[in-house]
Amino acid sequence: MAGDLDGLSPAVATVQVDNAEVRVTRWHFPPRTETGWHKHGLDYVVVPTLPGTLTIVGTDGGRRDYDYVPGESYHRTRGAEHNVVNLSDGTVEFVEIELKDR
């Protein structure tokens, strides 16, 4: 199972807004791409824009698949540490809105 994470390419992150209040990043995941390991330093909202399934890999190696449905947003608090991976045959995309401290 770990072998299916070998040879992944980076997902495409395009920062659309970065000001004193928010950072808005469009994440584009063609098949076999990943964010890479990261820890969220800010609370954030995710807004799916293209449907599909992404796999979240936790620091303990555990995995969970999430179905992304356009317009079905969710919120997470700072501190999440993971890698987001597209192991599917389709492209998946979302916009991440990080909420900066004021």
Image (tube, helix red, strand yellow):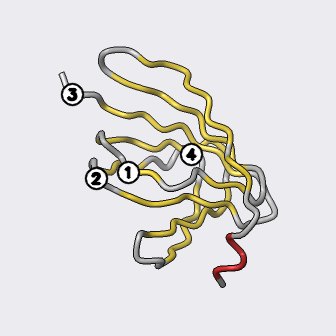
- Look at mark 4 in the image and give the residue it sits on: 48
Mark 3 falls on what kind of element?
Answer: loop
Q: Tag 4: residue type?
A: Pro
* Three-letter amino acid code at the position of disc 3: Asp
Q: Amino acid at mark 1?
A: Lys
x 44%, y 69%: residue: 58
| Disc 2 + disc 3, Cβ < 8 Å | no
In the shown orientation, is residue 33 left or right of residue 73?
right
* Mark nearer the N terminus (1 vs 3): 1
Q: Nearer the viewer, mark 4 or mark 2?
A: 2
Can you identify the residue that label 2 sits on?
79
Residue at the extreme bottom of the image, as rendered: 1
Q: Measured along the vertical axis of the image, is residue 20 above or below residue 23?
A: above
Disc 1, disc 3: CB below 8 Å? no
Measured in 3D between alpha carbons, the distance from the residue under mark 2 to the one under mark 3, in whole angstroms, is: 14 Å
Please report the residue visible at 30 percent of the width from the left and 20 percent of the height from the top. Answer: 21
- The outermost residue toward the right is 89
Give residue 39's mark. Answer: 1
